[in-house]
Amino acid sequence: MSALAVDPLWPRAGDWPAWSERADERTDAATAVIIGVPTWRTSLSPTSAHTTPAAVREALRRYSPTLLGPPPVDLTAALRILDAGDVADPDGPVGEEAATARVGDLASAADLVIALGGDNAATVPVARGAGARGLITLDAHFDLRDGVSNGSPVRRLIEGGLDPTRVVQVGIADFANSAAYARRAADLGITVITLDELRSRPETDVVAEALSIAGGGTDADADLGRIHLDIDVDVCDRSVAPGCPASLPGGLSADALRRLVRAFARDPRLRSADVVEVDAAADTPDARTVRLAALCVLDLLAGLARRPRGSA
């Protein structure tokens, strides 16, 4: 990569201060904390998704942290954003337990935890660690498979105690799932908004419905309504997400994904999110998938900055 231009009047995103593991060294609470959860060993498709957190951090520096507004807002100035590094080897029972505990520490001190995957297996420890009571997935797939893999996080979270009637799956696609898993979702009481339905409805209605269901109703408080957002980038069209092993032609556009991410992040009940299923090693030379993942991080932060005053 060629060196990036240096301009004191054009700050870059990323390179945020490091999270301190010692509470007595933290001068004040974080607004948002970034953490890498590079799961990959149980992936159903060959992947090097463990290389992605570093790639996303590098891609963030290609962008400014500025919302144009009006008025313009510098996210780095408006929010206290910290980077907690990566969980070492988060796969397997021991690694998953360590990731869950680490996310739990971060969630107790920050308004929003943003996890950089890794494959979709990262969703389990991140949602558990953040104490999620509801789940919204932006994903082409149900992720209700048997066993332990990147195809099973939703089923595993439900078996671990998550109320399936507070799970909303947005973007579920034709030819990417089986009838058996569609029946499983229906039997569990999961709300499914297919890709076709998403395209036929106003996005604002979809967002409002998903937040109300996952958050336990519009009047649920921020703690009882804790929501985790799983951003599986393979919900996007393969032309914009070629670095996702399971992305399909005909998926969501990049701007549609980003609008949804930013809209969900505006709700104070959203306390954690993951960006997963990007394999940086399989991306195109222009790194378009990794760059989209980095923009999703910035859109989460943008939504956080736009929350009603006093809610975050």
Image (cartoon, helix red, strand yellow):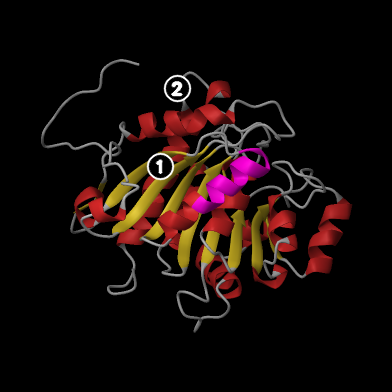
Residue 113: image location, x then y, percent = 43, 54
* Outermost residue to the bottom: 219
The answer to whether residue 95 is magenta is yes
- Residue drawn 43% across the image and 30% down it: 54
Residue 48: image location, x then y, percent = 60, 25
Q: Amino acid at mark 2?
A: Asp
- Residue drawn 59% across the image and 51% down it: 125
Q: Is residue 91 above or below residue 230?
A: above
Residue at image mark 1: 295
Residue at image mark 2: 286
Q: Secondary structure at mark 1?
A: helix
Left of 143 or right of it: where is 183? right
In this view of the protein, can residue 264 be seen by the observer? no
Q: Amino acid at mark 1?
A: Leu
**Alpha carbon separation for disc pair 2 and 1:** 15 Å
Left of 179 or right of it: where is 163? left
Left of 168 or right of it: where is 61? left
Type of secondary structure dominating the magenta stretch? helix
Which region of the structure is painted magenta? 91-101
- Residue drawn 47% across the image and 80% down it: 221
Q: Quadrant of the C terminus?
A: bottom left
Answer few, some or many: residues within 10 Å of disc 2's Cα (few below 14, many 20 plus, some between 14 and 19): few
Q: Quadrant of the N terminus?
A: top left
